[in-house]
Amino acid sequence: MPAATRNKYMETAVQTATPQQLLIMLIDGAIRFCRAGIEGIKNGQYEDANTQLVKAQNIISEFTITLNRDQPIAANLLQLYEYFNYRLVQANIHKKTEPAEEVVQHLLELKETWIQAAKLAATPQPQSSHG
């Protein structure tokens, strides 16, 4: 698929996505960038690894910025996102794949959680009748 067509497709996908779908797309991007960073470290391409890991950090930082702090789970998510960024910095500084691989595993779990939450949010809730 030509780049222009792919970009138009992605633009349309983003514009028509629900907030839950956007979050999942961003998690996918963070996973993809982490994996690319891991490959860069493994191949000794540290400049490329740095670029990819910073892209993943930017997405995770966006999660932190846009987090609804009024929700009860917000404090836990904030700590999790800060930990992810810390581990990615460690991977980048020490040129070790393990911290980034750990983040990928957490992101995969988080993605699955958000997919399940999106399904629950999309399911009509039964009306309770008070008789």
Image: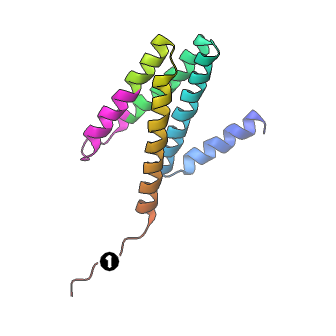
Image coordinates of residue 122 in percent, x first then y, are 45, 63
Q: Magenta span has 77?
A: yes
Looking at the rendering, which quadrant does residue 62 occupy? top left
Please provide percent x and percent y for residue 27.
50, 39
Total labels drawn = 1
Q: Which structural element holds mark 1?
A: loop
Asked whether, in this view, residue 79 is left or right of residue 7, the answer is: left
In the orientation shown, which residue stands out farthest toward the left?
131
- Which quadrant of the structure image shows residue 44? top right
Q: Nearer the viewer, residue 8 or 86?
A: 86
Residue at which label 1 appears: 127
Q: Is residue 123 above or below residue 129?
A: above
Residues in magenta?
64-84
Q: What's the residue at 47%, 45% (across, down)?
A: 111
Q: Quadrant of the C terminus?
A: bottom left
Residue 98, how many percent across, how many down?
48, 23
Please give the name of the residue rendered at 33% of the width and 39% of the height, measured from the top-left corner.
67
Q: Is residue 21 above or below residue 42?
A: below
Q: Residue at x 36, y 32 (%)?
A: 81
Residue farthest to the bottom, as pictured: 131
Q: Nearer the viewer, residue 109 or 62?
A: 109
